[in-house]
Image (cartoon, helix red, strand yellow):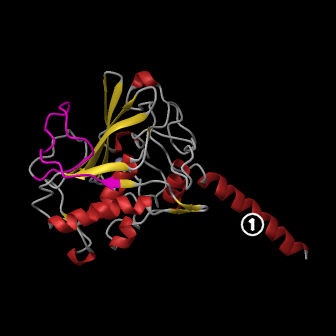
Amino acid sequence: MPKSRASSAVLVSALCLVVARDASAFCRTTTCDPNNPDDECRRNENGCVRDGVPIKWSELPIVYRFHGDVSSKLDPSGARTAVRNAFDAWENVECARGRTSLRFREGSDIKRNKPLGKKEAADKFGIFFRDDEWPHDDAEESLALTTQIYGKTSGTIDYADIEINTADTDFRLSDDEGSTKIDLQAVVTHEVGHYIGLAHSNDPDSIMVARYCASADRCGQSTDVARGLSEDDRRAVCTVYPPSSGAAAEPASAGCAQGGSAHPAEAVVLGGLVFLGCALARRRAPRPA
Ligand SMILES: [Zn+2]
């Protein structure tokens, strides 16, 4: 029957188009800093920076450590669980040929808080709740910030930490606390995406959108919706950390400054290492007319 045959042909073409577009929708952070005009980073059709080397950890498991005080504004046990669940979400992704090789290890607690000065050293791999002050200059209200130091040439990540803006943000740990608060686990899941080397995505379903409320489906919804990884997020982790421990693929990539002024990114070169911060911002409040 020609009519249905023609329909089938159209369907196949459409599927191929969708697959082709989705295959490169996620972005990786690279050594090309889009905030530095001297780097002259070019972007691909998905807005991902395509110059530079994708940053990556040299070995697994990747460590994270809590600052011992956690947060006085949240139930400490619940906050730890939210952070652990965020790391678990990425390392439990099932790929076509089995579970991703990505693994995390929770190290011993850090006793000293991260210094407020931006260029001072801090204990490695910390999860810091900023209860008293958000020490970063933000064009928007940042919910959290992931900072990484990596080799400018190699892209190998030597240092990472995550700061969470509990000073200015009402976070929730569960649905019971209402949908107007920001879900902590969702925010940390986004930051863990940066932690493993992913950049912001234009895909509204991705946890890696630059703003918490960039997707209407995510903002103000249940925790399951807010925290969920999209198909493209899963594809990202399966590509960068494939099931076998083989070398990671090197797909299309991008800098964390995806979205231009969407978030306060900072990059400072320190002795050949690049100090990079990627923040997740709240949606910009509309200006009064
Ligand atoms: Zn971000």
Q: In terms of secondary structure, where does tag 1 sit?
A: helix
* Residue 84 placement: quadrant: bottom left
- Residue 130 colored in magenta in the image: yes
Instruction: Residue 16: give x, y in percent of width and height.
Output: 71, 58
Q: Residue furthest right?
A: 1
User: In terms of depth relative to the viewer, which is nearer, 119 or 137?
Assistant: 119
Location of the N terminus by quadrant is bottom right
Relative placement, left or right, of 55 versus 125 is right
Magenta-drawn stretch, dominant element (helix, strand or loop): loop
At a point 84% along the width and 74% down the height, the residue shown is: 4
10 Å neighbourhood of mark 1: few (<14), some, or many (≥20)?
few
At a point 39% along the width and 39% down the height, the residue shown is: 257
Residue 31 vertical placement versus 141 (above, below)? above
Amino acid type at mark 1: Leu
- The residue where tag 1 is placed is 11
Segment tinted magenta in the rendering: 105-131
Residue 152 vertical placement versus 216 (above, below)? above
Relative placement, left or right, of 61 versus 180 is right
- Is residue 166 at least partly visible in the picture? yes
- Residue 4 colored in magenta in the image: no
At a point 27% along the width and 65% down the height, the residue shown is: 82
Relative placement, left or right, of 236 versus 208 is right
Residue 1 vertical placement versus 228 (above, below)? below
At a point 59% along the width and 55% down the height, the residue shown is: 22
